[in-house]
């Protein structure tokens, strides 16, 4: 009688645990780096004076980098030294960060647009005369093509290409991390520990964005040319839509962190001993049985050796297309990919433009919006991922249970998103854009509405954005000239404008014709609404994160083990290509259509948007997200149907292997079960009953 051997207690510093720690750190570093890029979107848009659609294209360059190499890295990389490939990827990602920051050192000092001309008086104060009648400030003339081309060259306006290239390199470097890292860990860990390990890795991956957004908030408050200019001479602050933070500083820091994250992988072996490999076969094969249930018959290899023999690159290349065919014949895998693509489209659009949505809808600065996302939404994501992994391990959910869990979490997420639609503030009150000069609501996309009787005598530029706030009536004016201001006192940020004729014409001015720099703050009830919005977004961040780990388990358990790395690679390739690149572009293009006032470049061209119609912004932004999530629910139902159908097929095969016998010892039911299985195999989309 044989005695089963039990494994000794695993050392606290085993190679598998070192691998797990290294994977956690690299997931933190890449998420830290990627989230900082997301948090810097607004700053980059303003620094290079580009529209949201173009910044969306730049943001999508990360996925373009993935697109170039991910399928081949995932397939061929599985046969090579996976840890070293991950280390090389970390080095490339660090280089990408440094290249992204490079334009700052090639550009001159940032010059924000302003209409104010000034001269120094003998008493040290500045007397501003914005409203002149000689046309000296009318700057709307269109420059010639030659002059504008020369100006664009001098202003280094094409340096955003470095940001594009650096972000694309980050995408190339990130390619081996997920498919090779997760498959490497899954190959050498106990099957029952896989969900917990993935939950830990993804949790560290969520901690990265939390710190990334906090770093983005900190850098957004620092002036872009900090250390090179006298900040007392700057007339704008971090709440102004023309403000550009020190976006480049964070890329240098995140690049250094990524360099450190790649070091351990250069010292890890090509393979590890299987965790608990001397335990009983029963324990080691808990998931293998379930995996067999959900892998199509034509994907199974009955004679797969324990240790594959060395093969040449030519043999690997020859087997590439047949492996892809086997992978794409798995209907569950393909349905899961399409569903994920649609959901990722909604998520990317949501997170990319959420800081701008909070800034335009609730009147918060970009730095504050980024900070709040980092300290509230992202911890909820981390908690959700841990919760999902814990539930999977605690209740030992099979694939059907995991799919039910994912569908429930998606429905709760959609409900939270629907509530956000009703948590809306009114437009910021800007005379001539969102309200008339008398204060009546009146949204206009035409620039000629900025001209009124009160400023008609002034030679004002309609192209520039230099807002001032009239404290007496709460209205914002696009510039001191358009407010009809005649004089001012103070210097820098302390400037106060006086004798503003348009403020005097307002029925709410109470004879106070003064204004200060910057936009007027939102009404107090908007702050109250914003608190509800943040509470709902926290809830809306928790539920989709709960479905992350079950979703990975469904993916891993629905494919053949030999195709695991390829399947993960193709999964990431398609998600990056169809889920990561398009949404930032078409979301940005739709948001651009809601712009009320465009800024002006140094050379006279159209710059970044300064203020949006927040109601139209909400309809475009949330409307597309609702449509995408609604479509994904339909596919979730199809996925569950296919999973349950395959489970019924497995049950029929189990009955065939263990048939009941009648009283004479003759097997009964074999014929019925066999015919049912044959029918099921011939028409897999039709549910079979006995």
Image: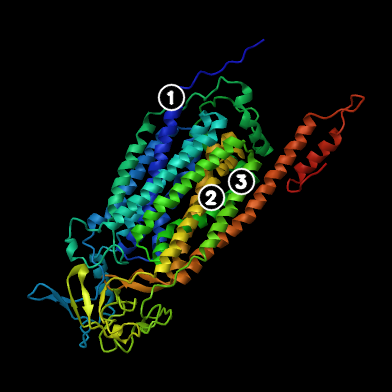
Q: Nearer the viewer, residue 665 or 322?
A: 665
Left or right for 647, reference 60: right
**At numbered mark 1, what does the secondary structure look like: helix, strand or loop?**
loop
Q: Measured along the vertical axis of the image, is residue 144 above or below residue 387?
A: below
Quadrant of the rendered image containing residue 83: top left
Q: Quadrant of the N terminus?
A: top right
Residue identifier under label 2: 544
Does residue 471 sit above or below 39 in this rendering? Answer: below
Q: Is residue 319 visible?
A: no
Disc 3 element? helix
Q: Give the Cα distance between marks 2 and 3.
A: 10 Å
N-terminal-most mark, 1 or 3: 1
- Res 113 → quadrant: bottom left
User: In which image quadrant can residue 232 be found?
Assistant: bottom left
Q: CA distance from mark 1 to mark 3?
A: 33 Å
> Relative to the observer, which residue lies in front, 410 or 362?
362
Task: Name which residue lies at 64% across and 24% down.
Answer: 282
Name the residue beneath numbered marker 1.
12
CA gap, disc 1 and disc 2? 33 Å
Indicate the position of residue 76 as horizontal and vertical percent values.
49, 37
Crowd band around label 3 with a 10 angstrom C-alpha radius: few (<14), some (14–19), many (20+): some
Q: Which mark is drawn over residue 405?
A: 3
* Percent position of residue 187, x then y: 53, 31
Q: Dot 1, how many residues are within 10 Å of its Cα: few (below 14), some (14-19), or many (20+)?
A: few
Residue under the point 46% across and 45% down: 382
């Amino acid at each position: 009688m044989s005695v089963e051997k039990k494994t000794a207690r695993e050392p606290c510093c085993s190679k598998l645990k070192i691998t797990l720690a290294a994977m956690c750190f690299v997931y933190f570093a890449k998420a830290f780096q990627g989230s900082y890029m997301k948090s810097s979107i607004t700053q980059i848009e303003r620094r290079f004076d580009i529209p949201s659609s173009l910044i969306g294209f730049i943001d999508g360059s990360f996925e373009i980098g993935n697109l170039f190499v991910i399928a081949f890295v995932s397939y061929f990389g599985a046969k090579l030294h996976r840890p070293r490939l991950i280390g090389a990827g970390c080095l490339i990602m660090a280089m990408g960060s440094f290249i992204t920051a490079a334009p700052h050192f090639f550009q001159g000092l940032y010059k924000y647009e302003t209409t104010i001309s000034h001269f120094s008086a003998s008493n040290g104060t500045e007397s501003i005369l914005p409203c002149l009648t000689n046309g000296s400030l009318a700057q709307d003339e269109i420059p010639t093509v030659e002059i504008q081309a020369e100006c664009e060259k001098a202003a280094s306006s094409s340096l955003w290409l470095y940001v594009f290239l650096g972000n694309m390199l980050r995408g190339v470097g990130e390619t081996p991390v997920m498919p090779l890292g997760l498959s490497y860990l899954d190959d050498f860990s106990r099957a029952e520990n896989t969900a917990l390990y993935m939950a830990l890795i993804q949790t560290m991956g969520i901690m990265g964005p939390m710190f990334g957004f906090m770093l983005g908030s900190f850098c957004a408050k620092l002036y872009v040319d900090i250390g090179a200019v006298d900040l007392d001479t700057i007339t704008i602050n971090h709440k102004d839509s023309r403000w550009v933070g020190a976006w480049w500083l964070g890329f240098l820091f995140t690049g250094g962190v990524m360099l450190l994250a790649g070091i351990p992988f250069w010292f890890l072996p090509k393979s590890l001993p299987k965790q608990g490999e001397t335990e009983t076969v029963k324990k080691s094969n808990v998931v293998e049985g379930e995996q067999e249930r959900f892998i199509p018959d034509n994907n199974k290899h009955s004679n797969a050796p324990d240790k594959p023999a060395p093969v040449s690159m030519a043999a690997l290349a020859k087997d590439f297309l047949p492996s892809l065919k086997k992978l794409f014949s798995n209907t569950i895998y393909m349905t899961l990919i399409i569903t994920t693509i649609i959901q990722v489209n909604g998520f990317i659009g949501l997170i990319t433009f959420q800081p701008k949505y909070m800034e335009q809808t609730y009147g918060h600065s970009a730095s504050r919006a980024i900070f709040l996302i980092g300290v509230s939404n992202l911890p909820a994501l981390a908690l959700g991922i841990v919760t999902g992994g814990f539930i999977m391990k605690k209740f030992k959910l099979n694939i059907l249970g995991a799919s039910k869990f994912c569908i429930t979490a998606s429905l709760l997420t959609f409900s939270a998103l629907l509530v956000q639609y009703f948590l809306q503030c009114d437009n910021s009150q800007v005379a001539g854009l969102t309200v008339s000069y008398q204060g009546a609501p009146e949204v206009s996309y035409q620039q000629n509405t900025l001209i009124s009787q009160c400023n008609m005598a002034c030679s004002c530029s309609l192209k520039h954005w230099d807002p001032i706030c009239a404290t007496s009536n709460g209205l914002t004016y696009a510039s001191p000239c358009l407010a009809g201001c005649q004089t001012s006192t103070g210097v820098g940020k302390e400037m106060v404008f006086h004798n503003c004729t348009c403020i005097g014409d307002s029925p709410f001015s109470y004879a106070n014709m003064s204004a200060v720099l910057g936009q007027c703050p939102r009404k107090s009830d908007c702050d109250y609404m914003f608190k509800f919005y943040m509470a709902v977004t926290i809830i809306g961040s928790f539920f989709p994160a709960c479905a992350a780990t079950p979703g990975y388990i469904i993916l891993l358990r629905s494919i053949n083990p030999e195709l695991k790395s390829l399947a993960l690679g193709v999964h990431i390739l398609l998600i990056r290509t169809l889920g990561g690149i398009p949404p930032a572009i078409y979301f940005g293009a739709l948001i651009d259509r809601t712009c009320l006032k465009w800024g002006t470049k140094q050379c006279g061209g159209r710059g970044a948007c300064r203020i949006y119609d927040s109601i139209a912004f909400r309809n475009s932004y949330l409307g597309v997200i609702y449509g995408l999530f609604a479509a994904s629910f339909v596919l979730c139902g199809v996925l569950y149907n296919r999973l349950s159908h395959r489970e019924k097929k497995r049950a029929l095969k189990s009955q065939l292997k263990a048939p009941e016998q009648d009283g004479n010892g003759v097997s009964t039911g074999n014929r019925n079960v066999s015919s049912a299985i044959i029918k099921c195999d011939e028409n897999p989309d039709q549910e079979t009953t006995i």
